[in-house]
Amino acid sequence: MEKKEILPYLNNFKREFNSYLKNDYSLKTVIYRSNEGVIMEILLRKDLEERDEFKKEEDSISIQLSKLDQNTFNNNPHNYKFKGTNIILEPNKIIIIKDSNLSEWTEKKAIEDVSKILNTQK
């Protein structure tokens, strides 16, 4: 996926999520792109420099998943297939895996994803 397809969703997600954070907390986002979709690793920490880092695009989400420091898919990440939006919560980290369907990358989806993570009703 192209950055221009990801950035509007990402900016809306961060704007919505930041409205719930204390002032001294921020988000650093690492984006792993592939032909199948995107993994967004969102680090949540106190006094962290807020920025977006785009990693080199790969052929599959599984290849990108194997590069992440995560605890959910410890066995063999190459056996997993992802559709739609998948949200994984880890200590001080949120991992969002989205397929490349453009309907997953709207402003509305960004707000829905934040709501799911924070379990809020809007």
Image (cartoon, rainbow, N blue to C red):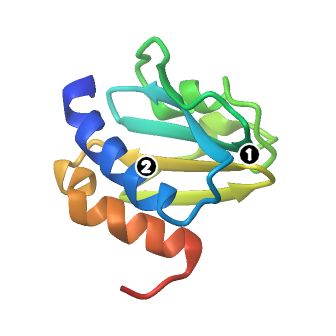
User: Between 23 and 51, which is closer to the camera in this rendering?
Assistant: 23
Is 78 placed above or below 46 here? above
Is 103 placed above or below 31 here? below
Residue 35, quarter of the rendered image? top left
Alpha carbons under labels 1 and 2: distance apart:
25 Å
User: Between 50 and 79, which is closer to the camera in this rendering?
Assistant: 50
Q: Which mark is residue 14?
A: 2
Counting from the top left corner in percent of width and height, residue 87 is at: 55, 59
Counting from the top left corner in percent of width and height, residue 67 is at: 67, 23
Residue tagged 1: 73
Secondary structure of residue under mark 2:
helix
Counting from the top left corner in percent of width and height, residue 76 is at: 73, 37
Q: Is residue 50 left or right of residue 113?
A: right
Q: Is residue 39 left or right of residue 104?
A: right
Q: Which mark is residue 91?
A: none
Q: Which quarter of the image is occupied by the N terminus?
A: top left
Q: Residues within 10 Å of mark 2 (few under 14, many from 20)?
A: some
- Residue drawn at 25 percent across, 50 percent down: 105
Q: Is residue 10 left or right of residue 117?
A: left
Is 36 placed above or below 24 here? above
